[in-house]
């Protein structure tokens, strides 16, 4: 029997148009809630980062509501598209002894007994308790999230059974030194089966339930509001600004369309009908019911949905209509990079130039298939990448920047150079990465380290323990989250903006400018049987737009 539910709760359910696929992106105690083991060291890193994935989609930042991160917040199951529960998140029911059947042995004297797994509710989306975790504030044209405490939860992975937590942390979670996790134990941040963990040497068993409280920071996004285009009894259609992911993913949670709509527009329990990259703006549709969601997804499967995008590309695009049918291969889902390759999935995009201002062209794009970064990769192949595309118009691709599929380096070298470029710009969020995800082979060895010595962490642990004690003694004076029934003594999830153990609190990051968060790719129109939705043409696509 498979160890039910023994997937790391950082696994994000990416909403494909047909079936959900799983993507590693969370962390148990990693910086900003990311998995330190995402990018492994040595040969393992190269093989994982370059292995072509078999599942393709037309975006990489989104997933359906009620996914595994939602389960992390509320201990709930992770429904996929249309409210279906993914098999990886289901828990097997407990075996009930029948006549003639002996009860399962509960453990010998002195042996640690693991309680049976709890049943999880299926089909529950984000609720008020999730929205209340923290709040927004606006500064310099950016929407920011106040740092907050967050619980990552998971049942023990199969490969961890019989191994100590010390071994698991030292081999799989390297975003922090072991001294940090030891300090987290002393501060009461780690729990095993809802009991405070006392020792990292404890050996894990099947069905062990782990909970780690971390101080979470989210990257800023544009302060541009999400405009409602249509709302009726069936659908909600919005004009999504660039830089905001549709669903919680990576370091983004409250700074996502799902959370903003729930918190600011009281639009909850929404079902995504298609996907957009985080940096792509424009028409984004949600169904209000599972029945409407399934109906439109069936239309998608039958190729009845027409999509039209507009973009601004480098140089003078041909005046005649251009059709690109080059197959696209996913180089790395973790870094989020694709390229044209004969081994890739077949796809087709039709392009038509709308205008040319002497330096760049506005182009209409009609993707007839839906592959990861399809429009962006095809434009790069044609030699006209999107003008400000931070990935496919990068010097990391070589002198020709990938034109004609010419890339004078291996996939490993390409990924290393892309990461190094964005690390230098402090823009790893573009790749959906953070410093803790980088293996020695990918990271910039000259970058400053945020690791602290063991002695300093001992002092921080004492400070964190003292602070937690103050919070428990006087929760009424703080912006706290109500404890769950039966855990009234636990008040660890507190909306405090600094934390003694948090490495992110010690970093000074330069905010991006609002212009840095815009990519010139916009979903202009979506049309299907009985509906057609438009969004306004963006400013950068206007005839009188001037480049800086």
Image: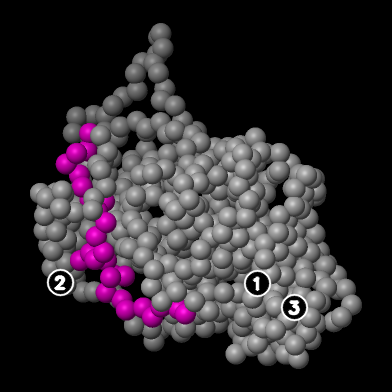
Between disc 1 and disc 3, whose residue precedes?
Answer: 3
Position in image of residue 394 (x %, y %): 61, 83
Q: Quadrant of residue 318?
A: bottom right
Position in image of residue 474 (x %, y %): 11, 50
**How many other residues sit within 10 Å of disc 1, few (<14), some (14-19) or many (≥20)?**
some
Q: Is residue 207 above or below residue 544?
A: above
| 349 displayed left or right of 445 | right
Which range of residues does the magenta coloring cover? Answer: 486-513
Q: Is residue 92 above or below residue 356?
A: above
Q: Is residue 120 above or below residue 349?
A: above
Contact, mark 1 vs mark 3 (Cβ under 8 Å): no
Q: Quadrant of residue 205?
A: top left
Query: Which mark identifies residue 455?
Result: 2
Majority SS type along the magenta span? loop
Query: Which mark identifies residue 10?
Result: none
Measured in 3D between alpha carbons, the distance from the residue under mark 2 to the one under mark 1, in whole angstroms, is 54 Å
Report the front residue among 524 and 81: 524
Q: Secondary structure at mark 1?
A: loop
């Amino acid at each position: 029997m498979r160890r039910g539910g023994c997937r790391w709760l950082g696994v994000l359910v990416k909403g494909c148009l047909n079936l959900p696929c799983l993507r590693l992106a969370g962390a148990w105690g990693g910086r900003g809630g990311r998995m330190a083991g995402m990018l492994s060291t040595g040969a393992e890193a190269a093989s994982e980062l370059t292995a072509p994935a078999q599942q393709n989609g037309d975006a990489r930042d989104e997933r359906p509501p009620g996914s595994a991160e939602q389960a992390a917040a509320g201990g709930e199951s992770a429904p996929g598209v249309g409210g279906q529960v993914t098999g990886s998140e289901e828990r097997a029911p407990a075996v009930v002894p029948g006549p003639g059947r002996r009860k399962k042995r509960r453990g010998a004297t002195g042996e640690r007994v693991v309680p049976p797994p709890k049943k999880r509710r299926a089909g529950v989306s984000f609720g008020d308790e999730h929205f209340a975790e923290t709040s927004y504030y606006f500064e310099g044209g950016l929407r920011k999230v106040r740092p907050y405490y967050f619980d990552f939860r998971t049942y023990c992975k199969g490969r961890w059974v019989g191994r100590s937590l010390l071994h698991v942390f030292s081999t799989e979670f390297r975003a922090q030194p072991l001294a940090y996790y030891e300090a987290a134990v002393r501060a009461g941040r780690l729990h095993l089966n809802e009991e405070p963990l006392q020792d990292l040497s404890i050996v894990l068993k099947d069905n062990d339930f782990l909970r780690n409280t971390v101080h979470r920071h989210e990257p800023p996004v544009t302060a541009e509001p999400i405009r409602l285009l249509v709302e009726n009894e069936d659908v909600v259609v919005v004009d999504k600004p660039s830089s905001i992911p549709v669903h919680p993913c990576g370091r983004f949670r409250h700074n996502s369309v799902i959370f903003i709509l729930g918190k600011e527009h009281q639009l909850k329990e929404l079902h995504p009908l298609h996907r957009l990259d985080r940096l792509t703006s424009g028409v984004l549709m949600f169904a209000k019911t599972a029945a409407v969601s399934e109906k439109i997804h069936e239309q998608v499967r039958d190729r009845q949905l027409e999509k039209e995008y507009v973009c601004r590309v480098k140089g003078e695009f041909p005046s005649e209509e251009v059709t690109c049918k080059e197959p696209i291969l996913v180089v790395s889902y973790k870094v989020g990079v694709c390229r044209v390759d004969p081994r890739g999935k077949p796809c087709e995009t039709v392009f038509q130039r709308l205008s040319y201002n002497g330096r760049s062209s506005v182009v209409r794009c009609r993707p007839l298939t839906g592959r990861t970064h399809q429009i962006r990769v095809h434009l790069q192949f044609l030699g006209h990448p999107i003008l400000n595309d931070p990935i496919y118009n990068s010097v990391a691709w070589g002198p020709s920047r990938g034109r004609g599929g010419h890339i004078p380096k291996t996939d490993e070298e390409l990924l290393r150079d892309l990461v190094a470029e964005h690390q230098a710009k402090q823009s790893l969020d573009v790749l959906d990465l953070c410093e803790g995800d980088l293996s020695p082979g990918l990271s910039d060895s000259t970058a400053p380290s945020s690791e602290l010595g063991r002695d300093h962490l001992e002092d921080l642990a004492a400070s964190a323990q003292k602070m937690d004690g103050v919070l428990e003694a006087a929760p009424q004076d703080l912006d706290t989250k109500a404890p769950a029934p039966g855990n009234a003594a636990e008040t660890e999830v507190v909306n405090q903006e600094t934390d003694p153990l948090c490495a992110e609190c010690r970093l000074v990051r330069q905010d991006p400018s609002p212009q840095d968060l815009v990519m010139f790719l916009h979903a202009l129109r979506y049309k299907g049987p009985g509906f057609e939705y438009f969004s306004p043409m963006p400013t950068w696509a206007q005839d009188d737009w001037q480049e800086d």
